[in-house]
């Protein structure tokens, strides 16, 4: 999102400077909207289609693919692989409090893809059945760190410990020059009240009045910082690259100057 915002600012600046003070602002707005639509079409929609094509080549018959939470890109990859007649099984791993993997599970089952659903605490058990891990990303930083849903780093660490390849599927508009080494320096905070209840378990009330406890605070981090040591490949619309090559993509394909 930060890269997209930067693009809009860079496109807006010259437009604003060229506006005739006596002219109506509608024309300038239409031109800016066209620039935004072009960005969405080229950097997101078209990039997604090419990325899916590149990633499907990594899916083989009899694969057992593990994915975590919900990624629309990973879903499209699995759906394309199914349409191409590849035979594989998906392990959907999930965790509280958001349980986003349930939506992915429903979508995959509706398209006839065989699935297994597990929670994050079963990672060490299920990893022995897995042949590779496909994960989405919210951002890929210049030092190879991947920002993804909280819990993704644990999945990648377990896969690396068992010598299973971890493949990150991410469009290059999510690449950023920023460097980050941990999940605390910059992150998004989720609603802490989501941690206080368990679905269909009204008897779990230990944290019901947590706001009244002056020495108790709940921390609900949304994203993980996944070190590049846990990543085998990053699949983009430009092909598959190792995480160490992220700066190359930033240098070669970033035409917009930094602001």
Image (cartoon, grey):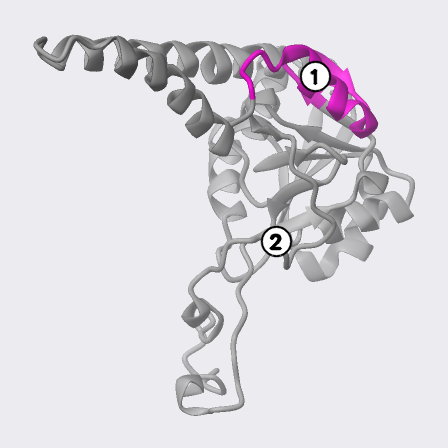
Q: Secondary structure at mark 1?
A: helix
Residue 173 lies in the magenta stretch: no
Q: Residue at x 82, y 50 (%)?
A: 158
Give the class, few, some or many, for how many residues have Cα within 10 Å of label 2's Cα (few <14, many ≥20).
many
Q: Nearer the viewer, residue 56 or 178?
A: 178
Residue 122 percent location from the top left of the image: 73, 58
Q: Residue at x 81, y 56 (%)?
A: 124
- The tag on residue 10 is none
Looking at the image, tell me whether mark 2 or mark 1 is earlier in sequence order. Answer: 2
Looking at the image, residue 219 sits to the left or right of residue 232; the answer is left
3D distance between C-alphas at marks 2 and 1: 29 Å
Residue 152 visible in the shown view: no
Residue 96 percent location from the top left of the image: 54, 61
Residue 226 percent location from the top left of the image: 73, 45
Q: Nearer the viewer, residue 3 or 95?
A: 3
Vertical order, 46 against 215 (above or below):
above
Q: Secondary structure at mark 2?
A: loop
Which residue lies under the disc numbered 1? 251
Q: Which residues are magenta?
A: 235-257
Residue 254 lies in the magenta stretch: yes
Residue 146 visible in the shown view: yes
Residues tagged 2 and 1 counted as in contact (Cβ below 8 A): no
Q: Residue at x 64, y 12 (%)?
A: 253
Q: Nearer the viewer, mark 2 or mark 1?
A: 1
Give the class, few, some or many, for how many residues have Cα within 10 Å of label 1's Cα (few <14, many ≥20).
few
Which residue lies under the disc numbered 2? 150
Vertical order, 188 against 171 (above or below):
below
């Amino acid at each position: 999102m930060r890269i997209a915002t930067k693009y809009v600012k860079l496109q807006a600046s010259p437009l604003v400077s060229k506006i005739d003070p006596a002219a109506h602002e509608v024309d300038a707005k239409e031109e800016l909207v066209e620039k935004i639509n072009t960005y969405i079409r080229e950097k997101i929609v078209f990039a997604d289609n090419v990325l899916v094509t590149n990633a499907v080549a990594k899916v083989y018959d009899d694969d057992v693919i593990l994915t975590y939470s919900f990624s629309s890109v990973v879903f499209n990859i699995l759906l394309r692989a199914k349409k191409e007649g590849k035979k594989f099984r998906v392990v959907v791993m999930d965790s509280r409090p958001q349980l986003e993997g349930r939506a992915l599970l429903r979508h995959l089952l509706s398209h006839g893809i065989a699935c297994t659903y597990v929670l994050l605490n079963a990672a060490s058990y299920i990893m022995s059945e897995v042949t590779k891990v496909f994960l989405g990303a919210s951002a890929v930083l210049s030092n190879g760190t991947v920002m993804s849903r909280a819990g993704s780093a644990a999945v990648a660490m377990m896969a690396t410990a068992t010598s299973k390849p971890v493949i990150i599927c991410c469009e290059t508009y999510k690449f950023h020059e920023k460097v980050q080494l941990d999940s605390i320096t910059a992150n998004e905070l989720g609603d802490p009240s989501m941690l206080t209840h368990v679905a269909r378990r009204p008897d779990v009330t230990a944290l019901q009045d947590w706001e009244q406890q002056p020495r108790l605070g709940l921390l609900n981090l949304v994203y993980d910082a996944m070190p590049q040591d846990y990543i085998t490949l990053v699949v983009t619309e430009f092909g598959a690259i190792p995480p160490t090559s992220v700066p190359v993509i930033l240098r070669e394909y970033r035409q917009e100057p930094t602001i």
